[in-house]
Every structure is written in structure tokens, then in C-alpha cells.
Image: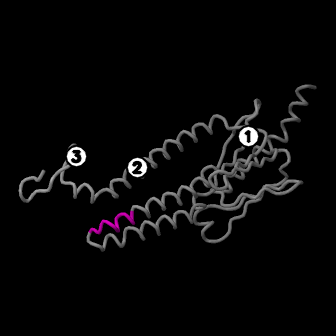
Amino acid sequence: MEGPEGLEPSTPGLRGPCSNQLSYGPAFASKIIVSYICKRAIFYCLWYNFDMKQEFAGQREDEKLLFHFRRHVLTMRKGFLATIVLILAGFVPYMFSSGNTNLLWIAFGCIILAIIIFLYHWVGWYFTVYIVTNQRIRQDRQKGLFNTSVVEIALGKIENIIVEKRGLMGNLFNYGTLVLQTSVGDLVVMMVPHPMEIREKLQKEVNRYRTEPIKESHEED
């Protein structure tokens, strides 16, 4: 059925002309997808941090979680750079194309690809956690999306803790390398934020662990 002269027909149940609705399809879809992913990511981050303050998988019955830390957020620098480049590559041509719908679909595809690349780097950063308890330090390292490796060292086996801060970026953004030396090998953690503070906290727990058995033996006597 044709509408009045000069007006475009409308689809039942939708507001406005069909051509206007279709021209904003990619932008509307990208907005919905990005909004959903951001909300879910924020919710899961808050839940995961709260849960980590209470307990963690593989925790022993007599074990107490003291603190945990992650590597510096700049560990994701490649993901940040790739995301920015893809977004610019998708939207800059569209901005100079006078509203070409085909270029808008290309921009939409670039956004989806940028999100996937960013999430890949974010998962590797966020789920790589270093957990310090009253008995050990544990490294849960995320490799890609589906692979995880776990390394743990008893506090009593740590012989020395070394901090290395190198270069302008390390001093400017306050990150460095933490080296835990043991008799069987070293655990090297790169790009640790506030490395001196974490070293002091960890050294305090190592010293406490070494003196606790002596105190208990005195109490038994």
C-alpha cells in the first residue's frame, strides 16, 4: 500500500520510515553489543574481586588468603594499540564518506574485531593472578583463552626477594620485575605494579613464616 505523496511507507510495529531505520542498523547493533559486553565485564570483575578477598580455588583448610596482585595494566599495551588502530581504521573512512552505509558496516566489523582482540589480551591480564597466603605464593597464569598454568612456592623456601626497575617507562608508571629466589630455581614476575610495596609485604610474610615455628616450639616447652 502506498502512503501519501512525498512520504515513505512505514513497517507495522516500527516507528518512522524504513530507510531511516535500516541506515542506523550497524550503529545501533554495535551500541547494543558494546554496552552488553561492558556491563557483563564490569559485573564479573566486581564479583571476582570480591570472591578473591574471601577464598580461591585450591585453598587449604588451614590456609588464609593475605593479599593478591596482578601485573601492571600496561601488560595489555598491544591490545590497547590494536583496538585503537582498528576503531580508527573503521570509522575514519566513514566520517569522510558522507554517510555511506557500506562503510558503516565495515566500521561495525572493525568494532567487533577490536572487541575480540581486546578481550583476548584482557583475559590474559585479568586472570593471571599472584596469590599470597600464610603458607605460600601461588601463580595462576592465564595463557590465551583456555589454558592455565599454576606454580606455587612455599614461603619457607623463598631465600631472597629482588626488585628490578628499569627504564623510563618502569619508573614513570612505577612497575618492575619481582624475582623470588629459591634453592630449586627462581620465580620471575615481570611488570609488577608498585614492586617495592609488594616486596615489603611479601618479605614480611616470609619473615613471619620463618619465626612462627620457633614461637610454637617455645609455647610447647
Q: Residue at x 43, y 62 (%)?
A: 109
Report crowding for label 1: few under 14, some 14 to 19, many 20 or more residues within 10 A (C-alpha): some
Q: How many marks?
A: 3
- Residue type at mark 3? Leu
Q: Is residue 205 above or below residue 106?
A: above
Q: Position of residue 126 (x, y in %)?
A: 60, 51
Q: Which of these two is toward me, 182 or 168?
A: 182
Nearer the observer: mark 2 or 1; the answer is: 2
Report crowding for label 3: few under 14, some 14 to 19, many 20 or more residues within 10 A (C-alpha): few
Label 3 or label 2, whichever comes before in sequence order: 3
What element does badge 2 sit on?
A: helix
Q: Please give the residue where the numbered disc 1 appears in the rendered image.
A: 133
Q: Position of residue 169 (x, y in %)?
A: 60, 68
Locate the C terminus by quadrant: top right
> Is the stretch drawn in magenta largely helix, strand or loop?
helix
| Label disc, if present, on residue 14 of the rendered structure | 3
